[in-house]
Amino acid sequence: MNRPCIFCDIVDGRAPAEIVHRTEHLVVFPDIRPQAPVHLLIVPAKHIRSVNDLAPEDRPILADMLLAGKQMAQRFGISASGYKLVVNVERGGGQVIFHLHLHLIGGWQR
Ligand code: 5GP
Ligand code: ZN
C-alpha cells in the first residue's frame, strides 16, 4: 500500500471514526453518509483492495467480518427485523473506497 487510503488511516487512528467494535482482524464504524437508520462499515485491518484481491490466507479475516456483521446486528437491535450485508466490488459494482469492507445496513423496521 503506497497510496493514501482513508480506511487504513481510520484503522491506524490517523483519521477520525467512532470505532464501535474491534477484533484482531477488523474494525467497525458508522458510515459517514448512512443509507439507513443503521449503517455500519466492517473493515479489515489489512489493506485488501477488493474481493478480487482476496487470497486463501484471508479466510480468517472473512470469517471475522461475517461474524462481526451478525454481532453488530444484534447489538444495534436489527437482528430480528433483518438487515443487509453488502460488498460492492470494483467500480462497476459501486465500490468507491478501494479497501475491502462489508456494509451492515438495516433498521427501516424493527
Ligand atoms: P463503497 O461504495 O466503496 O462500498 O462504500 C464506501 C462507503 O464509505 C460509502 O458508503 C461512504 O459513505 C463511506 N465513507 C467514505 N469515506 C468515509 C469516511 O471517511 N468515514 C466513514 N465513516 N465513512 C466513509
Ligand atoms: Zn487501506
Image (tube, helix red, strand yellow):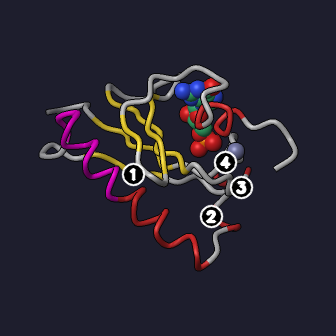
Q: Seen in the image, is 54 located left or right of residue 108?
A: right
- Of all residues, the one furthest to the right in this rendering is 2
Residue 45, percent from left and from top: 57, 48
Q: Which residue is disc 2 drawn over?
A: 51
Q: Which residue is disc 4 drawn over?
A: 99
- Of all residues, the one furthest to the bottom in this rendering is 56
Which-is-in-front pick, marks 1 and 4?
Answer: 4
Residue 21, percent from left and from top: 37, 38
Residue 31, percent from left and from top: 49, 29
What crowding class fits label 1: few (fewer than 14 Cα within 10 Å), some (14-19), or many (20 or more)?
some
Which residue type carries mark 3? Arg
What crowding class fits label 2: few (fewer than 14 Cα within 10 Å), some (14-19), or many (20 or more)?
some
Q: CA distance from mark 1 to mark 2?
A: 14 Å
Residue 41, percent from left and from top: 47, 39
Q: CA distance from mark 4 to mark 3?
A: 4 Å
Which residue type carries mark 2? Val
The image shows residue 95, relative to residue 76, as above or below, that is: below
